Amino acid sequence: MGRIEVNRSGEIEVFVRVVEEQSFSAAARKLRMTPSAVSKLIARLEDRLGARLLRRSTRKLQVTPEGVAFYESGLRILAEIAAAEREAAQGAAPRGRLRVNCLVPFSQHYLIPLIPIFLEQNPEISIDLSITDRVVDLLEERADLAIRAGPLVESSLIARKLGQSRMAVVASPAYLAAHGKPEIPGDLVRHTMLGFCFARQIEGWPFRDSEGKTMTIMPSGGPLVSDGESMRLMALAGGGIARHANWHVGPDIAAGRLVPLLEEFNPGDEEPVHAVYVGQGKHLPARVRAFVDFLVDNVKL
């Protein structure tokens, strides 16, 4: 036998209306139900509770002591439901605490400078910012949104692209003066290549030779770092050769602090940056929608 689903809040609402109207027929008119439907619902409610709530006669409807207690509790429950619905409806406007997870380079070069502007435009929103280059589980971390660089894996998350830019292998002038400049990708094995101390979707550095063939060289022999910004600072300090997106090191290249290497072998791959989050459409909290829209409008990679 199939399970009968019980709409408890609906039962409570009908019972409260019957008590207040002192009539099945009057309550049915208010609720746009038939009197027989109201009568059957009250009978099912009493059977489920194992208590008589109402005494019915041809002339009068009396509420039992159990019915009075249930009526008073029902009023409180309906008031709490109404308050919860009002609170959720208020969430349609951008307000509340927004939990954001962001990779280190993007947070320092783009997000942190933009947050004060966003909060000034949305004074009812507060932000909790967690910064890490590791990919986190949004539900596990209780984050509303994450900003991630690189290719996205298949998932239930919704993604909006904030931009993308070409990758480049770079080193500081000081490093090149001390160790020489690699002329072909194979020369990198004799250099200090900076890597990450956590697993990434794309571990190696891709190159394309003069015949159009692609090769991959794994970073080895150099320091391992926890995030892209630490790698950039290590490269600036002459600690080795790094591979970055131009959105991250473009100003350093323009200022001569970093030098692009092996450009003739660059395969032209680009690193995208996405805002990813759970939910979409009417189920997306207004605070998340407002923040994503703001990033799309203001991030220029």
Image (tube, rainbow, N blue to C red):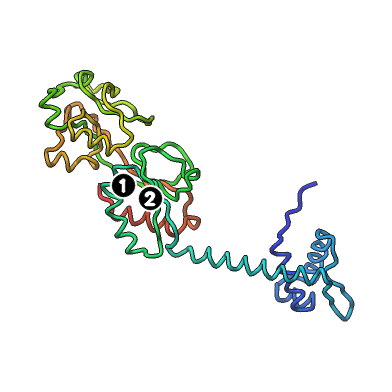
Counting the numbered discs, the total is 2
Q: Which amino acid, by three-letter code, is at mark 1?
A: Ser
Question: Does dot 1 land on a helix, a strand or a loop?
Answer: helix
Q: Position of residue 18 (x, y in %)?
A: 76, 74
From where the camera sits, is residue 6 visible? yes
Of all residues, the one furthest to the bottom in this rendering is: 59
* Image vertical order of residue 271 relative to residue 120, above or below: above
Q: Which residue is mark 2?
A: 129
Q: Position of residue 135 (x, y in %)?
A: 41, 38
Specify whether 258 is left or right of 5: left
* Image vertical order of residue 230 relative to residue 63, above or below: above
Residue positioned 87% across, 74% down in the render: 56
Pointer 2 with pointer 1, Cβ within 8 A: yes
How far apart in space, not on screen, are marks 2 and 1 (Cα)?
A: 9 Å
Corner quadrant of residue 238 = top left
The residue lying toward the viewer, choosing from 293 and 195, is 195
Specify whether 102 is left or right of 191: right
Q: Position of residue 114 (x, y in %)?
A: 29, 55
Q: Which residue is mark 1?
A: 107
Q: Position of residue 285 (x, y in %)?
A: 47, 57
Which of marks 1 and 2 precedes in the sequence?
A: 1
The residue lying toward the viewer, choosing from 167 and 268, is 167
Q: Residues within 10 Å of mark 1 (few under 14, many from 20)?
A: many
Specify whether 37 is left or right of 135: right
Q: Which amino acid, by three-letter code, is at mark 2?
A: Leu
